[in-house]
Structure formats: C-alpha cells, structure tokens
Amino acid sequence: MSTSAEPIVPLHVAIIMDGNGRWANARGLPRTFGHRKGVETVRETVKAAREAGIGFLTLFAFSSENWRRPEAEINELFGLLKAFIRRDLAELHRANVRIRVIGDRATLKDDIRSLLLEAEERTAGNAGMTLVIAFNYGARDEIARAAARLAEEVRAGRLEPHEIDAQRINDSLDTAGIPDPDLVIRTSGEERLSNFLLWQAAYAELMFVPEFWPDFTPELFRAVLERFAARDRRFGGLSAKPMAAVGS
Ligand code: FPP
C-alpha cells in the first residue's frame, strides 16, 4: 500500500474517560460498577490504540479535583488502578508498552507510589506505545509545580529568569519528553477540558463523543480517529504539519 493512501494517525491521543457514574445510574447500579466496567474499556482502548499505531495514549484516571468525591468512591478508583497495574503490567510489558505516570505523587500513599514507580521502571526500556496514566493529575497543579521547580533553579543560581521560555517550562512539566497531544477525546457528551493537559493541548484537536466511557468501543474509537484524519491542522500557520502515518 502506498504511503499516501495510509490514514493519518495521531502520534498522541489523550482521553478524558467521562460518564462511568451516569452509565451505572442509567442501569440502576452503584457508580462503582461504572468504574469497574470503565477498566474493561481501558483494556480494549489500549489494545485498539496499539493496533492503530498510536505512539502515546494518555488516560485521565484520577484528577486532583476527584478528592471531592465520597471516600468510598475514591477508594474504589485507587483500588481499580492498583488492580489494573497488578493484573495487566506483565501483559503490557510483553506487548512492549512503556508506562509513564503524570500527576502529583508526593501526596499519594507509599503503596500506590511504589506500584506506579515499579510500572514505570519495569517498562522503561519498551519502545512500543507509551501509556501515560494521569493520576492525581490537574494541569494547573502541574504548571504550578513546574514553576516552583524553575524558581528553585533560579534561587540555586543555576538558571537566570530570562532563560525561562516555553521550551524550559515544557521540559519542567510532568509530561517532559512526551509530545503534545494531537487529539483530545472526551466521552459522555460533556464539552470541556476540566483541567486536563491545559498547556500541552494548545493545538490539539478536540473531539467530544456522546457515549459514556463504558460504552466507548474500539469501533467508536476508530471512527473518532477517522474524523481526526479528515481535519485540517494549521498550527497557527497555513499548512498542516506532517504526522506519523500507519506503519511509519
Ligand atoms: C469519570 O466518570 C471517570 C473517572 C473519574 C475515573 C476513570 C477511571 C477509570 C476508568 C478506572 C481506573 C483507570 C485505569 C487507567 C485503570 P464519572 O464518574 O465522573 O462519571 P459521571 O460524570 O457520569 O459521574
């Protein structure tokens, strides 16, 4: 197949997995059932992303604002992430997936911190898709932590204030070394970013789908990728930037 006939695949897709609670409520089930079903969708989506040739997949698993939820639901979400890593790490590793975690880890308990670190360290040498898990993540918090790090550098005399530019800020974020998302998807019909990758999504295409996250099938994902391929991205200029094509 010639290169020109291959669909344009986003290098980095980021997803706000919304609607687990409403999916469960609609079935008369507790919200936690929606989160559990949501983990199955996570598995299918990771697989579909790998098959599509996506380089980076970021999933918003727990926001710094989710602490406002009832304690039982918070515990469920933490438990599901831990179970996911314990159960799926070996398989993700075998599939050459690299795991990165973004978000504030300083305030997390030791058990989850060491599990996240283990997932990152064990898969650090993998060159397939990178799965970025945003956990205890909020973009404003991430930017504030980056600013504090840079301020420390200035105070230590290793950096001059005039040397702080967009690149330096970029390199101080949790996502350092990860390309900006080309596409941000949000499920459940809500149309906002909710403090997700605010810096990095500056030029991302945004796509909102009405289905709740547990109903987001690989087929729907592929349909969104097709819509993305049809979009004209200009990055403030006149012509589109080239992107990775399937198989490239
Ligand atoms: C939003 O739905 C979803 C979340 C806050 C959590 C998403 C978490 C998972 C899918 C499971 C754990 C993740 C991984 C990576 C294993 P909502 O509860 O806000 O839904 P609602 O808006 O209908 O209430």
Image (cartoon, rainbow, N blue to C red):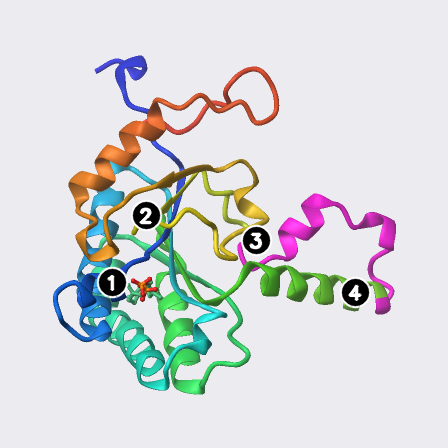
Left or right relative to 141: residue 49: left
Residue 197 seen: yes
The amino acid beneath tag 1 is Arg
What is the number of the mark on residue 151? 4
Q: Quadrant of residue 120?
A: bottom left
- Sequence order check: which comes first, mark 4 or mark 2? 4
> Within 10 angstroms of label 1, few (less than 14), some, or many (20 or more) residues?
some
Q: Position of residue 155 (x, y in %)?
A: 85, 68
Q: In which quadrant will I find the N terminus?
A: top left
Residue kind at label 4, given as amino acid type: Ala
Q: CA distance from mark 1 to mark 3?
A: 34 Å
- Residue that badge 3 annotates: 176
Q: In the image, which is nearer the foreground, mark 2 or mark 3?
A: 2
Q: CA distance from mark 2 to mark 3?
A: 30 Å
Question: Mark 4 touching mark 3, by CB under 8 A?
Answer: no
Of badges 1 and 4, the one in the foreground is 1
Q: Which residue is painted at 51% across and 43% down in the image?
A: 180
| Residue matched to label 1 | 22
Tell me the CA gap for discs 2 and 1: 11 Å
- Image coordinates for residue 36, horizontal then vertical, percent: 20, 69
- In which quadrant of this rendering is ligand 1 seen? bottom left
In the image, the segment drawn in magenta is 155-175
Q: Is mark 1 within 8 Å of ligand 1?
A: yes
